[in-house]
Image: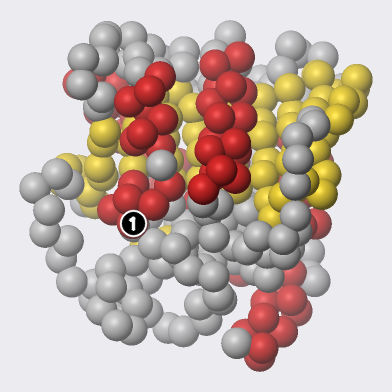
Amino acid sequence: MASSLKRLSALFGVSCAALLLAVPAAAPGHADHAVLRSPADECPAVQDPDNIAFDGRYYRVHVPAGVSAGAPLVVAIHGGYDSPDGVEAEWGWNALADQHGFIVVYPRGSKNECQTDGTPGWGWNADAADVTHIKNVVNAVSTTYGVDRDRVHLTGHSNGGQMASRAACTAPEVFASGAVYAPAPPPTGCNPARAVSWGVFASASDPIVLEPVAYGHVMYWSWENRPCQNEQPGGGTDVKDSRHWDCASGTEVLWRVYNGGSHHWPTGTRRTEMMNRMWQLFQANPRP
């Protein structure tokens, strides 16, 4: 464990440009340790009737009972060494969707990262092919369920947070806004055609995605939404840092770091608080 974290610290000491390729093999959303092993050649097939075979992969979708046409869509992107099934069970988006009447889709990464115990897992290259796949999933779900195309939002964790930022910066015509937790380094060489509201959440004691790395997304989206001014404290309890900026294009950027914590997607009251803030950002920022 100590040697793994030491190696990760060394990785995070290099430039974000190099990390864009170095980090996608991040720890899974349900793990609190670095995963630095080589994946098996083949993952066992995921046999679940609720999985939708699509585009050479599969995805999962949650549609609340009685949801009406024109509902928003949240695209929830798993981290490295994880799966749509894993994060759907752990993150809590389905319950929030039932409460507020939106749809959630969980796409699957392109990189085979099967774990040594045989548990299926995937990661994201965060490249053009992955962006195209996520856009295809969004189009399929939107066509099937009559989603409001102006209210398609992104969320993700770790490597999935990195993937979410890449999707938003290259396809702002599809995605309205986004909010991520413990994201791997932000995109490079990307110039979105419009400003996109973005929220970044992190934990002070995360040993894998260190606080300055997560804050790189704040700097990236503040730049792309520039100028962002009127810095305001975010308030709340049990937080190390919480700030919010209003930007010239009518967009916003927010940053929130919880005391302690880990690389886990938060649980309990902290998870509820974080996800409510994410949903509030989504509601306030449809695609113009």
Using the rendered view, name the quadrant where residue 21 is placed. Answer: bottom right
At horizontal 72% and vertical 61% (from top left) the residue drawn is 260
Name which quarter of the figure residue 180 lies in.
Answer: top right
Compare residues 180 and 206 and report the one nearer the observer.
206
Q: Quadrant of the C terminus?
A: top right
Query: Where does label 1 land, which residue?
Result: 86
Q: Is residue 50 above or below residue 81?
A: above
Is residue 246 shown to the viewer in this render? Answer: yes
Q: Is residue 21 left or right of residue 231?
A: left
Query: Can you say whether 133 is above or below 85 in the image?
Result: above
Q: Secondary structure at mark 1?
A: helix
Vertical placement of residue 268 versus 195, above or below: below
Residue for point 50% across, 77% down:
35
Name the residue located 38 percent from the left edge and 23 percent from the top edge.
99
Q: As drawn, is 46 to the left or to the right of 254?
A: left
Residue type of the residue flagged with mark 1: Gly
Q: Between residues 261 and 149, which one lies in front from this camera angle?
A: 261
Q: Position of residue 112 (x, y in %)?
A: 34, 68
- Name the residue furthest bottom: 3
Quadrant assignment for the N terminus: bottom right
Residue in front for this viewpoint, 185 or 262: 262
Q: Nearer the viewer, residue 48 or 21?
A: 48
- Percent position of residue 10, x then y: 75, 79
- Residue 166 visible: no
User: Badge 1: few (under 14), some or many (20 or more) residues near its Cα, within 10 Å?
Assistant: some
Residue 52, image x and y in percent? 17, 43
The colour scheme used to paint the residues is secondary structure
Q: Residue at x 80, y 71 (%)?
A: 13
| Image vertical order of residue 178 relative to residue 240, above or below | above
Where in the figure is residue 130, as x and y percent of width and height?
42, 47
